[in-house]
Image: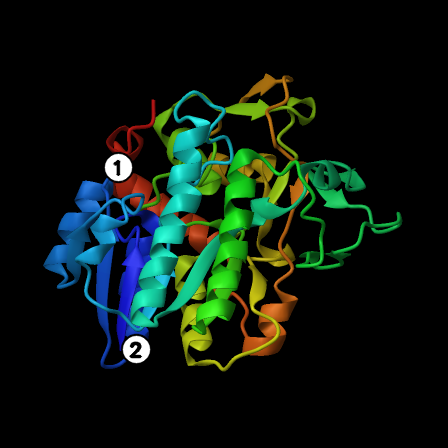
Amino acid sequence: MKILITGICGFVGSSLAYALRNRLENVEILGVDNLSRAGSEANRGALRRAGFRLFYGDLRMASDLEALPDADWVIDAAANPSVLAGVDGNSSSRQLVEHNLWSVLNTLEYCRRCSAGVIILSSSRVYSVPTLAALPVRIEGTSFQLDTSQTQPIGVTSNGISEQFSVMPPLSLYGSTKLAAETMALEYGSTFRFPVWVNRCGVLAGAGQFGTAEQGIFSYWIHAHASGRPLRYIGFDGCGRQVRDAFHPDDLATLIVAQMRGTASNEVVFNVGGGISNARSLAQLTEWCNHEFGARSPVRDLNPRPFDVPWLVMDAGAARKQFCWKPTRSIDSIFEEIARHVRDHPDWLDRCGVT
């Protein structure tokens, strides 16, 4: 089997390359990347030394895919991953659409040409921001928790947000590009008869992530805490009670293998994340960092930030039912892995271009 990973020099793409090679026999893994993110060059060198076959290419340019060899499967791990992309001044709205939608359309044309199946790595941010912001939550210690005594919107379970939750805009420009990419992938798969799986991923976290305050928050926070960089609790009374769940790329790789080995199904869109047991607030993460690296007090910033929500935990029950999948890595083990990376690479945020 031959697998092409787009965005292979990023954190998720490179992590999946190693994990899939360890899980599959007689597999050849190829990768394409435009090396636009700081840190990608270091990953490219490591991947080449590990024996992966890499191609330079910008997926926004259809011609850059023409020279790629045929593959049996494509894993779409290339994207601008920030929920603030297009509005933060670091990229334009047009650039965001080109990176997160046009590049997927060109990738789907590649899949059509060589009859390759595709696995789309989508996002939890395809869900409606106003509906998420209106979720009934209560304060429990240093975190928000879902208030199960109140009526919940459709798609909310005791385990988190399910695939039935509202995708009604506004989602953010980022979320809208990811949802549009999902739709086009499903249409291409149906029209040209190749398999498509869509994984709406929660927060992926682990050592070597190019974390920033806008994405990769768990990795960023631990590195920033240890290196003495400024930390802020933004919005929500400036107390850091907002909650997200995390899971490791190794667990995502396990699901991807099951999907590549699976058969056609009416259910092809899945929420994937760490779930309730792997959910933590920023304040809880700070408490963990205080124990590991010494006490710090983040600055309270009462000004809300666009698209932030108080509580977003992924219910992966559908993936568990269809593939017997659940994350095996605990959030504490993920934090410990990141902490080891912090100690080995104290200049990591500088190397990743974080200002």
**265 up-or-down from 138: above or below:** below
Give the mark nearest the N terminus, 2 or 1.
Answer: 2
Q: Which percent across, then down, holds residue 186?
A: 52, 63
**Distance between the Cα atoms at labels 2 and 1?**
29 Å
Residue found at x 57% / y 77%: 265
Which residue is the extreme one toward the front?
Answer: 191
Pointer 1 local density, CA inside 10 Å: few below 14, some 14–19, many at least 20: few
Instruction: Tell me: residue 165, above or below residue 136.
Output: below
Q: Is residue 93 above or below residue 2?
A: above
Q: Would residue 340 be found to the left or right of residue 169 on screen?
A: left
Look at the image and tell me whether residue 324 can be seen. Answer: no
Q: What residue type is labelled 1?
A: Ser
Q: What element carries label 2?
A: loop
x and y percent of residue 202 in the render? 54, 51
Residue 24 disc label? 2
- Count how many numbered circles sit on residues in the image: 2
- What is the quadrant of the N terminus in the image? bottom left
Percent across and percent down for residue 269 are 57, 64
In-front residue for pair 201/96: 96
Q: What is the basis of the colouring in this image?
A: rainbow
Identify the amino acid type marked 2: Leu
Task: Give the residue at mark 1.
Answer: 36
Picture coordinates of residue 28 (x, y %)?
21, 72
> From what the image shows, is residue 160 above or below residue 222?
below
Q: Can residue 103 be seen in this view?
A: yes
- Asked if marks 2 and 1 touch (Cβ < 8 Å), the reply is no
Q: Residue at x 58, y 63 (%)?
A: 270
